Image (tube, rainbow, N blue to C red):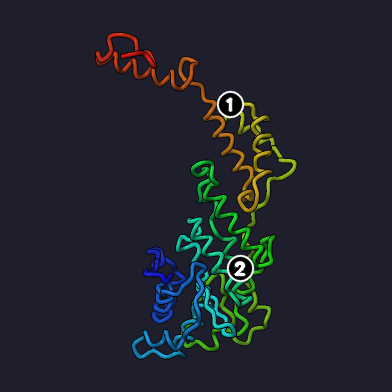
Amino acid sequence: MARSHGRILTGIWQDPDFLALEPEPQRLYLFLLSQPDLTQAGLLPLRARRWAQKYAGGSADAVRAALGVLEAARFVVVDDDTEEVLVRTFVRNDGVYKQPKVMLRMREDAKLIESERLREAFAVELDRLPLDELSDEPGRGGAPSVNAQVSGVVDALREDFGNPSGRVSEGYAVPPTCARARSPYPQPPTPETPTVSQDAPAAAVAETKPARPRGTRVPEPFPITPDMVEWARTETPGIDHRAVTERFVDYWRGVPGSKGVKLDWPATWRNWLRREHERARPVRGGGSRLDDNLAVVRELAAEEGIFQAPVQIGAAP
């Protein structure tokens, strides 16, 4: 089913890389985002001649030149051999990753990518999806959470691409044929695409940004430092820290796929202890939370003269 609209985040007008582009590449990028045949994976067939007809006085060469600028600035990835264009951040910026059912459709669309370069670029973007933002709450009837469903699709895509480990190269950032050579537009230097002379050696052209930190599974054994012990005693008193930590490790050891991968395990542990401490927080009078709430209601009611006799739960009116 063809798309009826395109989504453009207002934050694009605060993006210094986008604002540094000339008007024509900017216009082409917005044009690509609004195409009806843009798939849920961010893939488009390369149709320079047809797209040129939408530009007043445009030409296929002008479209390809603007594409070259967008590619060098890492907004798109282009493969002239397979005639495909990938809008690199589409799955993230369009919110596809937030919708499990749409992610299933996206997986089918991604499997249709022919270009190896585009598949590699797409695999890199899978690792950049902010899955930690998704809900871990179970669905209705005990159905898997949104996070679990989406993480399952991401793991399946890695297997589809023959890369179950998720380890991918980011060498696609600089295309094999330098886009600068065919572009009449000045190209803004960015942290991800350093300024390189046309005569620079190949090693300099292939330079990319430092690898982003990757998460890990829960360590075995889980290291508890003296600072962590002191923090737990101060911030979460009154709970069995040893038992809670054992439950914490057992839980995360059994979580499958990318959901069980975290960048900062001590921070995850602290958040876990905070929740346990909140659940164990004693209520007024040592009773249950329900008793405590009823006591407050009775006090307020007595002050207002609403009840003249004690209230009993379940008593006949």
Q: In the rendered image, which residue does mark 2 sit on?
A: 209
User: Mark 2 or mark 1: which comes first in sequence?
Assistant: 2
Please state, as top left, top right, bottom left or bottom right, where the C terminus lies in the image: top left
Place residue 178 in its image quadrant: bottom right
Place residue 15 in its image quadrant: bottom left
Question: Is 85 drawn above or below residue 259 in the view shown?
Answer: below
Residue at the image position 29 percent from the left and 16 percent from the top? 301
Q: Looking at the image, can residue 173 be seen?
A: no
Q: In the rendered image, which residue does mark 1 sit on?
A: 237
Please state, as top left, top right, bottom left or bottom right, where the N terminus lies in the image: bottom left
**For residue 170, side relative to residue 139 (left or right):** right
Place residue 131 in its image quadrant: bottom right
Q: Looking at the image, can residue 128 be seen?
A: yes
Question: Is 317 drawn above or below residue 121 in the view shown?
Answer: above
Residue at the image position 59 percent from the left and 34 percent from the top? 273
Report, in whole angstroms, how far the alpha carbon at label 2 lies from the one at label 1: 44 Å
The residue tagged with tag 2: helix, strand or loop?
Answer: loop
Judge the density around disc 2: few (<14), some (14-19), many (≥20) Cα neighbours within 10 Å: few
Q: Nearer the viewer, residue 250 or 203?
A: 250
All told, the count of numbered labels is 2
Judge the density around disc 1: few (<14), some (14-19), many (≥20) Cα neighbours within 10 Å: some
Across and down, in percent, residue 211 comes to 64, 63
